[in-house]
Image (tube, rainbow, N blue to C red):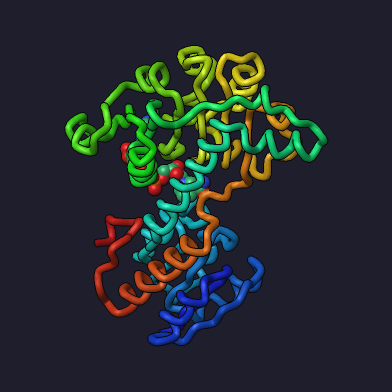
């Protein structure tokens, strides 16, 4: 069997593949990809390579497309399904890494770490201004209580926090079994001291946090988005954070990435990272190895564990 790895992949994952398959590790341009794809039974991508309908059409021998990560927006899944090509991914690979980044942001906001670093470098000693708060005893508000939302709650328990979670697709019983309080979106916004977003970006969740939602939050509350840009309305966040409607925010994801000259950069109480949620060595290895295993399973005629187009089962 012949597999094309067309984006950077962890060495550990390449080793898994090479034990069973003939592997080409290239970074083809879109044109090159179109001209070579016919040779391969499987392709593994991250987010750089676009597996378009044309690529799938030309991939006469293609049986599986692996995405070493979670999001499959760079793959034409509909076309793959029409052609009976399985799309597999590694949905749990970055769960812990994203949850830890959320904690990095929470601690940074609570103790003004990013601002303190900047102000010291600029020659100021603003000890009085930088009075912080503890996480202990505070309420974590989680919007979207899936894999990452639950992992953040797990970490929060070590800090002595309590949790109110909103997830319209999860029953009250399941949420409460996990030790959190099940709330409405309004409840999470009103009660949360640190509100963290872990929903998927859909038409329903686009701008789900906007002016009206900020108006419900405590003026002492912080909001963190390490899910997808667009769930928070950035213009509304700018007004809320600038005007003291909320205490501050942290964003790992943006409506447009890279965000360019975003007005939010003017604000001292909003912290940023450039979509680093899954950017840890461990997450890259986990996602790569899991995807390699899934692709080999499909090519060996076995049922994959993480199939995106489940209708093919
Ligand atoms: P998941 O599918 O396990 O959980 C998502 C949860 O959101 C589900 O429980 C779902 O029921 C819930 N949900 C759906 N619609 C909702 C709504 N309208 N309101 C509230 N909740 C809603 O996904 P996950 O693996 O936990 O990922 C969560 C988010 O993190 C996704 O947006 C994903 O794209 C993002 N992510 C970001 C990074 C990063 O680098 N920053 C890395 C991985 C994942």
- Side of 272 relative to 185 (left or right): right
In what quadrant of the picture does the C terminus appear? bottom left
Residue at 52% in and 20% down: 210
Q: Nearer the viewer, residue 47 or 146?
A: 146
Residue 176 locus on image (x, y percent): 21, 32
Quarter of the rendering containing residue 77: bottom left
Residue 138 locus on image (x, y percent): 40, 26
Residue 220 locus on image (x, y percent): 52, 18
Q: Is residue 149 visible?
A: no
Quarter of the rendering containing residue 142: top left
62 up-or-down from 219: above or below: below
Residue at 51% in and 66% down: 45
Q: Is residue 167 visible?
A: yes
- Side of 257 relative to 124 (left or right): left
Q: Nearer the viewer, residue 60 or 37?
A: 37
Residue at 40% in and 61% down: 89
- Image quadrant, ligand 1: top left
Q: Nearer the viewer, residue 36 or 88?
A: 88
- Side of 306 relative to 119 (left or right): left
Residue at 27% in and 76% down: 301
**How many marks on residues?**
0
Quarter of the rendering containing residue 200: top left
Residue 121 locus on image (x, y percent): 78, 40
């Amino acid at each position: 069997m012949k597999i094309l790895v067309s984006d950077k992949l962890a060495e550990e994952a390449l080793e898994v593949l090479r034990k069973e398959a003939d592997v080409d590790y290239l970074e083809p341009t879109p044109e090159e990809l179109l001209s070579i794809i016919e040779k391969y039974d499987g392709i593994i991508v991250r987010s750089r390579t676009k597996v378009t309908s044309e690529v799938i059409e030309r991939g006469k021998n293609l049986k599986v497309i692996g995405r070493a990560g979670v999001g499959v927006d760079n793959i034409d899944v509909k076309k793959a399904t029409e052609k009976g090509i399985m799309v597999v991914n590694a949905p749990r690979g970055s769960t812990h890494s994203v949850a830890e980044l959320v904690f990095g942001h929470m601690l940074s906001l609570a103790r003004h770490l990013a601002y303190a670093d900047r102000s010291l470098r600029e020659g100021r000693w603003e000890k009085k201004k930088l009075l912080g708060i503890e996480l202990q005893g505070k309420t974590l508000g989680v919007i979207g209580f899936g894999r990452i939302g639950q992992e953040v709650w797990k970490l929060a328990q070590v800090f002595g926090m309590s949790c109110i979670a909103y997830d319209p697709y999860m029953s009250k019983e399941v949420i409460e079994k996990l030790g959190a309080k099940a709330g409405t979106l309004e409840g999470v916004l009103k009660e949360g001291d640190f509100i963290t977003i872990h929903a998927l970006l859909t038409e329903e969740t686009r701008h789900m946090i906007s002016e009206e939602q900020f108006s419900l939050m405590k003026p002492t509350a912080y909001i963190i988005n390490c899910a997808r840009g667009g769930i928070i309305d950035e213009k509304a966040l700018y007004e809320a954070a600038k005007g003291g409607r909320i205490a501050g925010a942290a964003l790992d994801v943006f409506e447009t990435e890279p965000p360019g000259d975003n007005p939010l950069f003017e604000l001292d109480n909003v912290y940023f990272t450039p979509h680093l949620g899954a950017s840890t060595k461990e997450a890259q290895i986990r996602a790569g190895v899991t995807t390699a295993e899934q692709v080999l399973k499909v090519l060996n005629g076995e049922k994959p564990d993480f199939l995106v187009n489940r209708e093919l089962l």
